[in-house]
Image: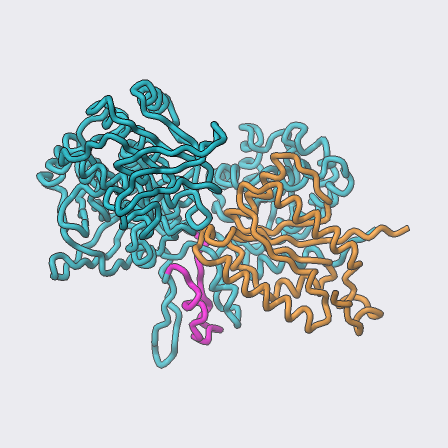
Chain colours: A cyan, B orange
Amino acid sequence: MQKIRTGVFICHCGNNIASVVNVPELVEYSRGLPNVVYAEHNLYTCSPDGLRSIGSKIKEYSLNRVVVASCTPRTHEQLFRTTCEEAGLNRYLFEFVNIREQCSWVHMHTKEEATRKAKDLIKMGVIKASFLNPQEEVEVQVAPSSLIIGGGIAGMSAALNLANQGFEVHLVEREEALGGLLRRLNKLFPTNEDATKLIQPIIERVRNHERIKIHMPAIINDVSGYIGSFDISIEEQKKDKRFQVGTIIVATGAQEFEPNLGEYGYGEMPNVITQLQLEARLRAGIGSAEKVTMINCVGACIPERSYCSVFCCVTAIKNGIILKESNPRANVYVLHRELMAYGVEFEDYYRRAKELGVRFLRYSQDRPPQVVGNGKASIVRVYDELLGEEVELLSDMVVLATPLVPNQGNENISRMLKVPLSEDKFFLEAHVKLRPVEFSTEGIFVCGSARWPADIADCISQAYAASAKAAILMRRGFARVEPITAFVDEAICAGCGSCALVCPFDAIEVQPRDGKRVINITAVKCKGCGCCAAVCQSGAMQQRGFTDQQLVGMIDALVGRGIT
Amino acid sequence: MIIYKPKVIVFCCNWCSYAGADLAGTSRLQMPPYFRIIRVMCSSRVRPEWIIRVLRNGLDGVMVLGCHPGDCHYQTGNYFARRRIALTKKFLEYLGVNPKRLQASWVSASEGGKFAELVTEMTHELEKLGPNRLFTDESGGNGTETTP
């Protein structure tokens, strides 16, 4: 076996590290650590000079392990790995030691202790590095086709975006028509254009596109495979169909929450309706009323459904404007808790509603409005927070603004795709800021109200984002899987299958072979959590880059309390 | 005078708690300097044997920090971690180690403050418990730590 030759590069980060930690002392200390043949310090290891130095020292000292002690792997690991690679060293023979965020910046007033800690951290890194092995990234082909689940505005926008770029699209819609919730709307805020005018041309384009295959009404039965080649099985009009795609976009949308029976008289008084029902009436030209009271946040922003549904306030404003414009003598009240008319357009829109005479009145959650009437609503009684007293509003129509709630099918789809749901059962993206339309499962994306209640503009821009992300993979034609995946030592594996039981991604299978049970790992499905390695009783199951040997080595580097 | 400085190993998952620890640094939150972080991809990677090993090596405490329930990058890893820690605590008790030497908690990438608080609290807790001598010190090796 090749002798291990480790180089340690310690960064001053200007003053960020060096003003607290005694860097020259760390260099001296590093030189005495096992397998270390070279150590130096740099003003900035990540600067061109610092990187050049790593490259030249790898060659000069025949280094086969590199340890950098500086900031955090979250920002700089790829940079240093690439530097190693450029100097001819496998990029996975690099180990990062964090002595800035997790040392110098948090122990500014205890410099000696901080230096002692930095020494420990470097020692742990050097020992882990000794146990590192070169790794190759697994490359998988990505087929130029996509499954889009949901034929609402988000799904259709994503479908068109991909199909126009030349990719095959399978659009699966469970209802009998495309268009989703948008199909049921009357006019759209803030332009008050007809919903039909927006949605109809999009539906036509989707229907007539040669590269979009519409499956409708259809449901997904099963999804297997992984990024690049997902096997999809659907049931379309009672017939089973199968096809393969490279990427998947979840655009299942959401549904309007229906108030509980009797809540504000809903279901008991015929003139108590939801905003979506009002839209239907307005479309049919039967929505006019003289005295309209709208109640916002019905079933939203409450303990059991704590989120804000984003667009209900603006919907109330919109329908207030429409009612006032068609009948200026109508009395329209909007009872709200918070009024979310965010951004430039919506604030203007709100102002316009007030100018037209829509009255806004704030109630508190502790004193919700009461709908009173005999067989049908006639009065809404509400404690006006600003006025500080109860007012009675004569009403011949009460409109309840309710939030969007997740589709019931979400749990099933989440299970099939191995992607998570939030506590509210909406789909949960990989990172709320940095990866808003991706799942952590590669090759699967999300857009629209499946992820969170979104208005139409948001649905469309998220759909473009998700389809652009999918297109990157399909255009390139392959994807790489980071080698932090599981592997098994068959010589000591007993085939118990505990690993397969805990794998959240179905990456592990137990298979019979030559009268033995053996473990089969699909590397591209493995996301590298290491849960399997933690349950393995024999230690046969391991995780690349985080083996028992590497981590126990780090633990054992710290024998003793080192108390003074 | 010997001042006792409890040494703690903190297992952080790559996605949430390690990022939270980084944020504590970026926010310059000052903490006792006796903890050492070991990064794993997921809290579910932590083998209970490692926890025992840390304590057997004479260190004073172990923390396992993962993502909040429902936020795990690997969907359910933190639930596995939670169950394993609960069992390991029982096992520690059986060994005669105060289970307070092992703590598990959730720290998101945006909770630098919580990370700092947890580490500080753990350090103070261990100061109260005193050094972990159970496995290293003959005089303490036969005894049992009092369980509060």
Residue A85 in view (yes/no): no
Front one among B26 and A337: A337
The residue at 10%/41% (across/down) is A207
Percent position of residue A512, x then y: 34, 76
Position of residue B24 in the picture relative to residue A401 (left or right): right
Front one among A420 and A43: A420
Percent position of residue A194, x then y: 17, 29
Position of residue B36 in the picture relative to residue A540 (left or right): right
Residue B28 in view (yes/no): yes
Magenta part of the chain:
A483-505
Q: Residue lying furthest front in this view?
A: A374
Dominant SS of magenta comes to: loop
Q: Is A493 contained in the magenta span?
A: yes
The residue at 33%/51% (across/down) is A260
Percent position of residue B84, x then y: 56, 65
* Position above or below: A346 against A370: above
Q: Quadrant of residue B47?
A: bottom right
Percent position of residue A157, x then y: 22, 37
Front one among A6 and A502: A502
Q: Residue lying furthest right in this view?
A: B1
Q: Quadrant of residue A106?
A: top right
* Position above or below: A478 against A417: above
Q: Is A160 contained in the magenta span?
A: no
